[in-house]
Image (cartoon, helix red, strand yellow):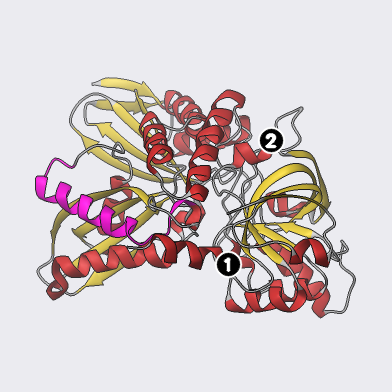
């Protein structure tokens, strides 16, 4: 049994929250550079130029990539041979978020849903913990922006709707979102599971490396087909018209009930931020 | 062909009337920030027949909730938030002389109608370019509603703030035109 003190968890989450907000991932930078090269619309090209410059300024000056520093989602994969000591794990994660958002001059964007009073420290973070084999603790810190989250949807389709129904709903979600979720976007699609599992599959799909191929060739082809359908909408970067409405479509799929066909579409803006730490 | 227009606030009817969708604008002068909560308070004051904490005639409102400034900086990241949440409040502010709004995303038919009626424009800034846009903001002070934190009304001094005309006061909509041009 390997021991990990939860103080290490707090320090890791604090650092990851800041890094995620200042440094756009290499996969996203490559995707933006590709967009800058290939976008046809002049206004869209200008958007890509601005986003690349924005990423540079954020990284160098430690200014958040986006003022919406997100609701912090933390995916924890806890090795079953790890013994957490020194305190409450969940509270240690929350404390890491609290400290990171304070020390990093990050915006505190959480409020009571009815009174709308800000919680003041960007907590509570949403934490998903799964138990996995091994003696490591993997923490994925994901600041999720509100604008793109607002455009996300869950559909409980009839099984008869089939693949055609799934495609229709994914494209409809992106079409209806228009310029709101800050395109060019990443589209996470969860197919199957239960009502809430579909949404979680969609969110996890957003974490896959942009530009990577789905291991299942059929789903890889479906991702490409959906991306083409979406980019044929013409919405373009920031909705100004153009070829790049989305940079990637990522699908996660699992079996569902014989009566159901859950489909979730989680929209992610171009400020696709996530930072992984392994303890 | 798009043109680049340099404008200084406050804006006149003439400034606004000369703008066309797709024009790039570099805005300088004083602008004011407001999001959902601040809009609600302004409208509550108007409905109660009370004075607003700022004069709206000729002014520009920026939909933004900036991140905190580091010591020595004017402001943190400061890109636009999605504008549709302000739509229910906007026509009343346009009626009071507001000349331009900066945000991102589509406006309601009521807002577009009010822009034609009161001669005003809607400008888009690049959403998610908060670090880049912060470089155009030279000063920031809280003007009202400090208790709202990032949602307080700030008075900003900007220099060559980059934006693009989404809705002009003739009723055109760049989002609609862009899709028409690039849809397949």
Q: Position of residue A238 (x, y in %)?
A: 50, 53
Report in which chain the residue with disc 1 lies.
Answer: B
- Secondary structure category for the residue under label 1: helix
Q: Of the residues under marks 1 and 2, which one precedes in the sequence?
A: 1
User: What is the span of residues highlighted in magenta in the rendered image?
Assistant: A214-237
Between B2 and A198, the one nearer to me in the picture: B2
Residue behind mark 1: B84
Q: Is A227 left, or right, of B152 in this rendering?
A: left
Residue A220 seen by the camera: yes
In the rendered image, the quadrant that contains the N terminus of chain B is bottom right
Q: Is A276 left, or right, of B84 in this rendering?
A: left
Q: Is residue A211 above or below residue A15?
A: below
Report in which chain the residue with disc 2 lies.
Answer: B
Q: Position of residue A90 (x, y in %)?
A: 42, 39
For the point 27% across and 54% down, the residue is A228
- Secondary structure category for the residue under label 2: loop
Residue behind mark 2: B135
Query: Which class describes the residues within 10 Å of circle 1: few (<14), some (14-19), or many (20+)?
Result: some
Q: CA distance from mark 1 to mark 2?
A: 26 Å
Q: Position of residue A204 (x, y in %)?
A: 30, 46
In the rendered image, the quadrant that contains the C terminus of chain B is bottom left
| A221 part of magenta stretch | yes
Prevailing secondary structure of the magenta residues: helix
- Can you name the residue that lies furthest to the top here? A2
């Amino acid at each position: 049994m390997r021991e990990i003190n939860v103080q290490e968890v707090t320090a890791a989450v604090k650092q990851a929250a800041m890094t995620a907000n200042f440094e756009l991932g290499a996969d996203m930078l490559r995707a933006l550079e590709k967009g800058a090269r290939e976008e046809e619309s002049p206004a869209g090209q200008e958007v890509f130029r601005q986003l690349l410059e924005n990423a540079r300024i954020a990284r160098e000056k430690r200014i958040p990539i986006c003022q919406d520093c997100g609701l912090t989602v933390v995916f924890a994969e806890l090795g079953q041979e790890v013994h957490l000591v020194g305190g409450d794990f969940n509270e240690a994660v929350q404390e890491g978020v609290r400290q990171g958002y304070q020390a990093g001059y990050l915006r505190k964007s959480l409020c009571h849903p009815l009174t709308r009073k800000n919680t003041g420290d960007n907590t509570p973070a949403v934490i998903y913990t799964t138990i996995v084999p091994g003696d490591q603790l993997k923490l994925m810190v994901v600041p999720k922006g509100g604008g793109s989250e607002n455009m996300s949807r869950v559909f409980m389709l009839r099984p008869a709707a089939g693949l055609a129904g799934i495609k229709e709903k994914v494209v409809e979600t992106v079409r209806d979102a228009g310029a709101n979720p800050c395109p060019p976007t990443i589209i996470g699609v969860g197919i199957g599971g239960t009502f809430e599992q579909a949404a979680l599959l969609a969110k996890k799909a957003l974490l896959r490396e942009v530009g990577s191929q789905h291991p299942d060739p059929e789903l890889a082809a479906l991702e490409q087909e959906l991306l083409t359908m979406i980019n044929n909408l013409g919405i373009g970067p920031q909705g100004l018209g153009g070829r790049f409405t989305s940079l990637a479509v990522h699908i996660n799929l699992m079996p569902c009930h014989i009566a159901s066909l859950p489909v979730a579409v989680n929209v992610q803006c171009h400020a696709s931020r996530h930072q992984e730490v392994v303890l | 062909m798009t043109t680049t227009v340099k404008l200084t606030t406050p804006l006149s009817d003439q400034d606004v009337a000369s703008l066309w969708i797709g024009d790039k604008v570099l805005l300088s002068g004083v602008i004011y920030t407001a999001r959902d909560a601040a809009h609600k308070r302004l409208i509550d004051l108007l409905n109660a027949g009370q004075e607003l904490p700022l004069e709206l005639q000729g002014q520009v409102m920026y939909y933004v909730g900036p991140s905190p400034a580091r010591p020595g900086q004017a402001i943190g990241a400061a890109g636009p938030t999605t504008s549709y949440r302000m739509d229910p409040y906007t026509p009343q502010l346009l009626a009071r002389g507001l000349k331009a709004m900066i945000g991102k995303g589509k406006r309601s038919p009521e807002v577009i109608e009010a822009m034609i009626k009161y001669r005003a424009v809607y400008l888009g800034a690049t959403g998610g370019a908060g670090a880049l846009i912060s470089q155009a903001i030279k000063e920031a002070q809280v003007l009202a509603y400090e208790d709202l934190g990032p949602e307080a009304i700030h008075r900003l001094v900007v220099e060559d703030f980059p934006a693009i005309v989404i809705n002009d006061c003739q009723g055109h909509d760049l989002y609609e035109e862009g899709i028409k041009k690039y849809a397949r």
